[in-house]
Amino acid sequence: MRPFDVLLFDLGSTLIYFQGDWPEIFMQANKELVSYLRAAGLDLDEGVFLEEYNQRLQSYYSERESEFVEYTTAYILSTLLNEHGYSQVPDELISSAIKAMYSISQKHWHTEEDAKPTLEKLQGQGYHLGIISNAADDTDVQTLVDNAGIRSYFEMVISSAAVAIRKPNPRIFNMALDTWGIPPNRAAMIGDTLGADVLGAQNAGLFAIWITRRADTPANRAHEDTIQPDATIGTLSELLDVLNKLGA
């Protein structure tokens, strides 16, 4: 007997992982963004604009972690360009420049080795599967899912960028569950972040499973004594045993 009808997964550091020097790749991606805009005819000072863009990103990142709302990359970029005198930049150019930027980091994301085998078994057992990802760009999330080769396992992929709400806000979990029209107590969330994934799921009434393989982060260490998951797994392959025991 299945203990749940729906299993929701985080994406980054849960189903896929990043390999590389993040600060260096982040800077390469931002340089690609500015180069793309300059090539399109925008007279931007690369050094000045990069510094302001990075500062703006950090400011919004801090704000969204306390307000649990999502500021998209497109919004941040458009706002800054407007301050530089470019108030009529076509949406198509903004989207294309952002796509070029994310293409740099997308090369460094890899699928966890046990992701597909685990998802295959869960799907075969009749679970409905979905993804909830905190991210500033929905297209990037959807591209990462496709690149990972896991699209076929999921009936729903929702990003905070698409709905303007971030985990742990309970509303984003409720939005996901609306896909199937099931109550929270028939769903479980699997993710690597204690605050966003575990506490968020619990506050929304879901069963929360913490995956620790890539969870050794400052944020998680700060919450280890205050946020207690309903179950803990080291890898995705361990999820099957946990679910079987819960359903026994």
Image (cartoon, helix red, strand yellow):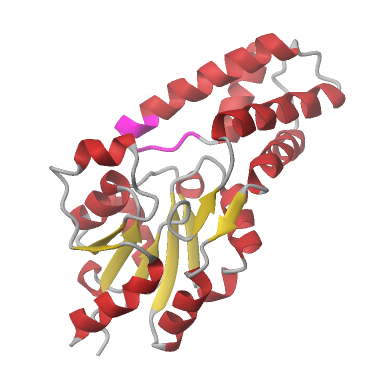
Give the percent coordinates (x, y) of residue 137: 57, 43
Residue sticking out furthest to the left: 226
Q: Which residues are magenta?
A: 64-71
Q: In the figure, is residue 226 to the left or right of 159?
A: left
Residue 124 in the image: state x and y as whole percent: 45, 88
Q: Residue 3, relative to residue 148: is it above or below?
A: below
Picture coordinates of residue 84 (x, y %)? 68, 11
Residue 64 seen from this side: yes
The question of residue 99 being in magenta is answered with no
Name the one closer to the observer, 27 or 189. Answer: 27
Above or below 224: residue 32: above
Residue 78 figure quarter: top right
Q: Nearer the viewer, residue 227 or 127?
A: 227
Label total for image? 0
- Identify the residue at the far bottom of this view: 1
Q: Tell me if residue 103 comes above or below residue 40 in the rendering.
A: below
Identify the residue shown where x is 43% and y is 73%.
Answer: 129
Snapshot quadrant of residue 67: top left
Picture quarter with the C terminus: bottom left
Q: Residue at x 56, y 52 (%)?
A: 141
Residue 65 quadrant? top left
Q: Is residue 85 visible?
A: no
Where residue 75 sits: x, y (%)? 57, 31
Q: Is residue 42 left or right of residue 244?
A: right
The N terminus lies in quadrant:
bottom left
Residue name at image x 39 percent, y 68 percent: 236
